[in-house]
Image (tube, rainbow, N blue to C red):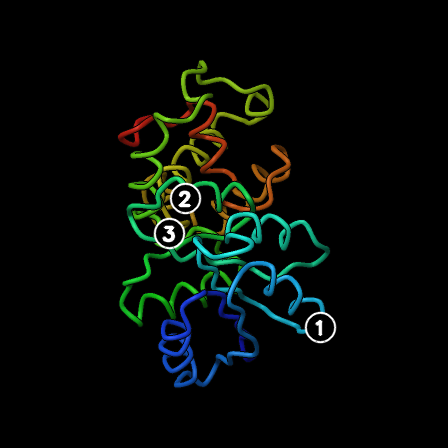
């Protein structure tokens, strides 16, 4: 199956570079481009896209608001935010808006391609160690980060589900969680699915955001 990708960035040179990298892949095709969020939304009305590579700072409509509007639509494409370390707050906002993950703009091509494939396959946590560093750095600025580490919905979880949720929030993959808790990957996947259902969350990224916002995981990765 070919992954249909849309490039959204106000710098044409960057789009050209990304397009060249993606065009060399047998399982990827750049089917659309846009120079800002407003144009991206317009293009998506008539173009079928699987994954959107979304810049953050753009004229007219920035990547965060564009992501929010795109993800609010029926059967939306996956969104992968492209950011830099000096835009941490934008990346966090992008995750809250519905992005499946984010990568740094200077990421090696192989990692970018892997991230696109991961997001397309439904694995929302992209570069979990980077996600953890970003949230550790930004979470103290969250208004709700001072709350007690309790959440009415979280209380619905079993002890094991809570353990799995904390490890997901710390950026561990299903395989790593399985090794840590001495479980099979299939069992971990089942637990993650139940967590998403019980907490009414869309994907693993939302698990991470909720865990930080409620204080279940605090800066430094401690639960």
Q: Residues within 10 Å of mark 1 (few under 14, many from 20)?
A: few
Q: Residue at x 35, y 77 (%)?
A: 17
Distance Cα–Cα, label 1 vs label 2: 45 Å
| Residue carrying label 3 | 175
| SS at circle 2 | loop
The picture places residue 201, in percent across and down from the top left corner, at: 60, 39
Is residue 198 depicted above or below 29 in this figure? above
Q: Nearer the viewer, residue 147 or 176?
A: 147
Q: Residues within 10 Å of mark 2 (few under 14, many from 20)?
A: some
Q: Residue at x 42, y 79 (%)?
A: 19
Q: Quadrant of residue 108?
A: bottom left
Q: Earlier in the sequence, mark 3 or mark 2?
A: 3
Q: Is residue 167 left or right of residue 61?
A: left
Q: Nearer the viewer, residue 83 or 136?
A: 83
Q: Quadrant of the C terminus?
A: top left
| Residue carrying label 1 | 46
Q: Which mark is residue 183?
A: 2
Q: Earlier in the sequence, mark 1 or mark 3?
A: 1
**Circle 1/circle 2 CB separation < 8 Å:** no
Give the number of the mark in front: 3 or 2: 3
């Amino acid at each position: 199956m070919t992954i249909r990708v849309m490039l959204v960035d106000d710098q044409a040179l960057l789009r050209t570079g990304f397009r060249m990298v993606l065009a060399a892949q047998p399982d990827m095709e750049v089917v659309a481009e846009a120079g800002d969020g407003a144009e991206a939304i317009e293009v998506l009305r008539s173009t079928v896209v699987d994954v959107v590579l979304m810049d953050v700072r753009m004229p007219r409509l920035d990547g965060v608001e564009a992501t929010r509007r795109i993800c609010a639509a029926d059967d939306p494409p996956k969104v992968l935010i492209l950011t830099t370390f000096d835009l941490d707050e934008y990346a966090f906002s992008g995750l809250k808006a519905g992005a499946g993950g984010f990568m740094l703009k200077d990421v090696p091509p192989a990692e970018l391609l892997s991230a696109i494939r991961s997001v397309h396959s439904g694995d929302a946590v992209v570069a979990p160690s980077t996600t953890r560093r970003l949230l550790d750095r930004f979470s103290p600025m969250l208004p709700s980060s001072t709350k007690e580490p309790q959440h009415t919905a979280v209380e619905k979880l079993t002890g094991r589900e809570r353990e799995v949720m904390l490890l997901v929030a710390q950026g561990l993959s299903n395989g790593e969680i399985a090794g840590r808790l001495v479980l099979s990957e299939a069992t971990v996947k089942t637990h993650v699915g139940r967590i998403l259902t019980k907490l009414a969350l869309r994907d693993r990224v939302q698990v991470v955001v909720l865990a930080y916002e409620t204080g279940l995981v605090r800066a430094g990765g401690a639960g």
